Image (cartoon, helix red, strand yellow):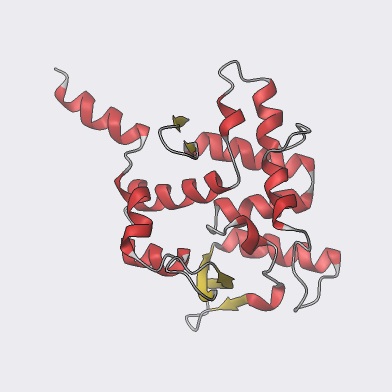
Amino acid sequence: MRIDDSGKRTKVWLDDDEADTLQRTLDKQAWERGIAGMLMLRCGLRSEETTTVSPGDVERDKDGESWFLEVQGKNTKGGEKTTRKAWLPDDVERELLKFSRERGIEDDDPYLPYSPRTIQNWITNASETGAADVLAESDPSEDWEHVSSHDLRRHWAHYHLVEERVAPRVMMSIGGWSSYSAIEPYLTEPSTTNIIEEMSAVQN
């Protein structure tokens, strides 16, 4: 985990193991919290977007194999919200289907009928019941105390752009960034793995 506190808002860059740990913690706390974690960590949704998507927003592509999730979200250029198709991994689609069936969620009803603040508090809050707060209790470094809900989306973007080298234009489309300048910070930040690989190659 790397912490960037050079700006007004502290940014946290989670690695894959830390993202998995956070997801498992959310899963243990409640099914709803696990769903929120998957939507942010695996689909790149903002916390407020997790409260609006419904079973009716799930779409199978014409190839018969791929899934998308229609999301109305922030316009990074300003103005009215924009609609995008977020990439929906197969296992997340299956979990959403199981969740909606067992909870009796109708096509037009949101999976998570909560406020964005509630979703954010599932990650961290003052009463220390958020997943990051729970993890911070057993972490001597106390790094988890800096994690916010937006850091889940940050991990998703950074992982795909830097680790998997997905084209920025593709990420802009499925992540809801209207300009290259909005996504550039995720693209230019090296991962710990990148740093180790590059510097190990030149240290001898």
Q: Is residue 163 left or right of residue 35?
A: left
Residue drawn 75% across the image and 78% down it: 107
Q: Is residue 17 above or below residue 163?
A: above
Q: Is residue 154 above or below residue 136?
A: below
Tell me the quadrant of the picture where the C terminus can be found. top left
Q: Is residue 18 above or below residue 184?
A: above
Residue drawn 50% across the image and 40% down it: 9
Q: Is residue 36 left or right of residue 153?
A: right
Q: Position of residue 61 (x, y in %)?
A: 51, 79
In front of the other: 64 or 41: 41
In front of the other: 65 or 139: 139
Q: Position of residue 75 (x, y in %)?
A: 48, 69
Q: Is residue 69 above or below residue 136?
A: below
Residue drawn 63% across the image and 65% down it: 93
Number of numbered discs = 0
Q: Position of residue 22 (x, y in %)?
A: 62, 38
Instruction: Give the quarter of the image for residue 4.
Output: top left
Q: Position of residue 59 (x, y in %)?
A: 59, 78
Q: Is residue 149 left or right of residue 14?
A: right
In front of the other: 2 or 198: 2
